Amino acid sequence: MNYISTRGQAPHLGFEETMLTGLARDGGLYVPDTIPAMSQDEIAALAGVSYEEAAFRVMRPFLDEMMPEADLRACIARAYAPFGHDARAPLVQLAPGHFLAELFHGPTLAFKDFAMQLIGQLFQYSMKRKGSRITIVGATSGDTGSAAIEAFRGLDAVDVFILFPNGRVSEVQRRQMTTAPEANVHALALDGDFDDCQAAVKDMFNDFAFRDAVGLTAVNSINWARVLAQVVYYFTSAVALGAPHRPVDFTVPTGNFGDIFAGHIAKRMGLPIGQLVVATNRNDILHRTLETGRHEKQGVAPTISPSMDIQVSSNFERALFEAYDRDGAAVAQLMDELKAQGGFPVSQGALQALRETYASGRASEDETGATIRDIAARTGETLCPHSAVGVKVAQEHLTERPMVTLATAHPAKFPDAVEAATGRRPALPKRMADLYERPERVTETPNDLAALQRLIKERRTS
């Protein structure tokens, strides 16, 4: 299988090089040139198997010849061994026909662990075989950074630099990034918002001299391997609710669009998904795009669901690539307009294609808090604010089909928001009970590309 860029001007790569490259050299994002299909019988056969076995069956066709089957199985087993629930992604029923997929049982209590723990194993396998070293630079609105640090901390062949917006992540999210003692880990608090962090990372990738000098690679959701790993829990959730014999709907709280694009890939593979519902907070550029046909930045407002405080949604480029019939030149022009003018109109044909693929909704701050309070009172389930955004929007899109809302983080990652809504402060799991006592190690940095590049060159292990 080959992987191609959404902007059409980068070399085609196999899976391993796509994973190690991250962002294509033309600025685009890699996607597979074809989507392998699973038959109804193959999907039905996932019923009752372990999460690890389902992951192997779903992902194997995308990895071409990167590794023998036994090695892939071993990587998957190591990736999910630290999870705190044997089902890995268990379902909880909230109401008749409405289910919550708990994706927060990994080591950093967020859905990002599903992809990051696996990528850590795949990177380590690849680097050991190649005898080379890489530098990971990532931007995070909260959860990606801690998941990346947890996955790569202490590895011999990797330096990790994570940029996060200073003062715009929760204390738990910050401490998960700043308390890792390993020398190969660097938490950088940037003076700016998440979009500034993400822009800095993209600019570093587009500086080819710097990129090659430090062996730069990305583990943000721009990395195709991240999206692929997230496809799996769509299959396990849907099969548990009767797929392929009946379709299942999904609602996904999302800011960067990677998690819901994984659902689109699952549907393309043959999983019978009815609706894919985009759930946004007040930073609702994705909802506004689907409503109005214009993709336009309006500034980032801080919210109680900070991981969704985004206006430049990187993975939306992958959705546009599909909606524009994989016309790389058209996508490149749209991305140029977004950078230069802050927005662009979506063509009528592409907008129709997007609306046929995705529904959407938004939740205000008051609605998010009210949903946390209501669900706790009616079901005893405590939601993080991101999951609450998803549940609120899902309730507006319920049909006769089962609905699964993705619960993206443990409520204890956002204790202030949960306490304000319910009057009860959620506790961290026992394995993280000492998080507030651990010493922090963080570098505050200006929003200056040259300064960031100097810092990375100085601190990476040569």
Image (cartoon, helix red, strand yellow):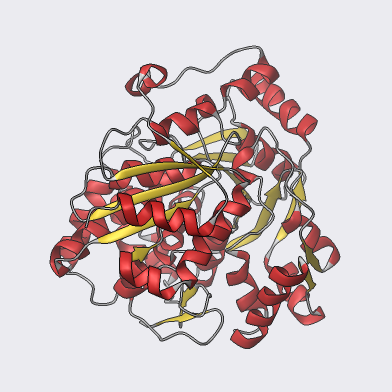
* 355 or 193: nearer the viewer: 193
Q: Which residue occupies 39% across, 63% down?
A: 225
Q: Does the rendering let one see residue 317?
A: yes
> Is residue 327 shown above or below 79?
below
Query: Residue at position x 26%, y 54% from top?
Result: 158
What residue sits 34% from the left and 72% below the top?
212
Q: Quadrant of the N terminus?
A: bottom left
Q: Residue furthest top?
A: 423
Residue 327 visible to an observer of this rendering: no
Q: Which residue ends up furthest to the right in the rendered image?
A: 292
Q: Which quadrant of the rendered structure holds the C terminus?
A: bottom left
Where is residue 169, by image quadrant?
A: top right
The x, y position of residue 446, in whole percent, is 55, 46
Residue 432 percent coordinates (x, y): 36, 23
Note whether 433 is above or below 135 in the view shown: above
**Residue beneath the point at 79% across and 54% down:** 298
